[in-house]
Image (tube, rainbow, N blue to C red):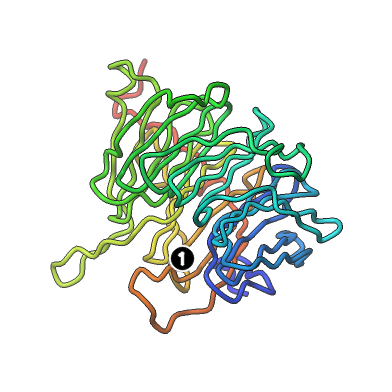
Amino acid sequence: MASATGRELSNPPSDGISNLRFSNHSDHLLVSSWDKSVRLYDASANVLRGEFMHSGPVLDCCFHDDSSGFSAAADNTVRRLLFSSNKEDILGRHDAAVRCIEYSYAAGQLITGSWDKTLKCWDPRGASAQDRTLVGTYPQPERVYSLSLVGHRLVVATAGRHVNIYDLRNMSQPEQRRESSLKYQTRSVRCYPNGTGYALSSVEGRVAMEFFDLSEASQAKKYAFKCHRKSEAGRDIVYPVNAIAFHPIYGTFATGGCDGYVNVWDGNNKKRLYQYSKYPTSIAALSFSRDGRLLAVASSYTFEEGPKAHEQDAIFARSVNEIEVKPKPKVYANPPA
């Protein structure tokens, strides 16, 4: 157990970690992997509570509540996982791998995004018959790479640098259709906890800070910044930014890159607050616990350089100190009288 990186959880997945998420109700952590499993951990007790095997790699997972969750798999299925009985059922299917999954507490619906270039909404309370659980199918301009929700707002990032913004109460068409302000492929999109916009990261070591409000004043606040890069022998080495996670209390956020680093940023003041010690390999996913006291880190090679010998896949749960995530007050050269 290296305290610099946090406590390493026992019984990690045996292949690449596609995502991990803390519950909204406890320190339970759900982890999806290319080893065809979804694992449920108690992160503070370091105990594996359950494991669900699928017939293909699992590309994403999310909680419904503390007794159940959902998974998105490369075998085109969307599954519901019941933790107490270790049972699962198939809610429905896409026509290609299901890349992302989010549960909306506001709408009581499950949203899935697939490489079949569609978004689907499901009512998990419906009977297990697929036609009764599917609420709607919404075509997207390209394969879906990342989804994020805040309140009734849904942000969908696809291949081809498209970004669609929906109101879950009216899914007939996007509220806004945008293009990513970054020139390269999108890796992750995450909404600000305060609901005013979203952060979007790319494969080319950059993050864009965007705002929903289309007024000139709001759009003037948007910006992008470089991160997860290094200079070596006069050359800039640039790494994909795979993960973004917002702190639930302070609204600051962590990014994880293929350089093995986790950085914490204050988006309002455009400052880096902290950089954690380097992890063994690429950061594949990040999640803060509901109270912001724990940060789960997936250290897992994401094959950005193709097949090669790499460190074992690992999950670290690290305690978060306030100094690492709390915005620093602005210091004025001449304090106002």
- State the residue lying farthest toward the bottom: 309
| Residue for badge 1 | 277
Seen from the viewer's position, the closer of residues 69 and 330 is 69
- State the residue lying farthest toward the right: 85
Where residue 173 sits, quadrant-wise, is top left
The tally of labels here is 1
Residue 155 in the image: state x and y as whole percent.
Answer: 46, 35
Answer few, some or many: residues within 10 Å of disc 1's Cα (few below 14, many 20 plus, some between 14 and 19): some
Seen from the viewer's position, the closer of residues 8 and 97 is 97
Residue 161 in the image: state x and y as whole percent.
Answer: 31, 44
| Amino acid type, residue under disc 1 in the picture | Ser
Report the quarter where the N terminus lies: bottom right
* Residue 266 appears left or right of 71: left
Is residue 308 depicted above or below 180 in this figure? below
* Residue 130 appears left or right of 213: right
Seen from the viewer's position, the closer of residues 276 and 181 is 181
Report the quarter where the C terminus lies: top left
Is residue 219 depicted above or below 28 in this figure? above
> Which residue is painted at 37% across and 66% down in the image?
259
Residue 254 in the image: state x and y as whole percent.
Answer: 47, 49
> Which residue is painted at 49% across and 42% down in the image?
147
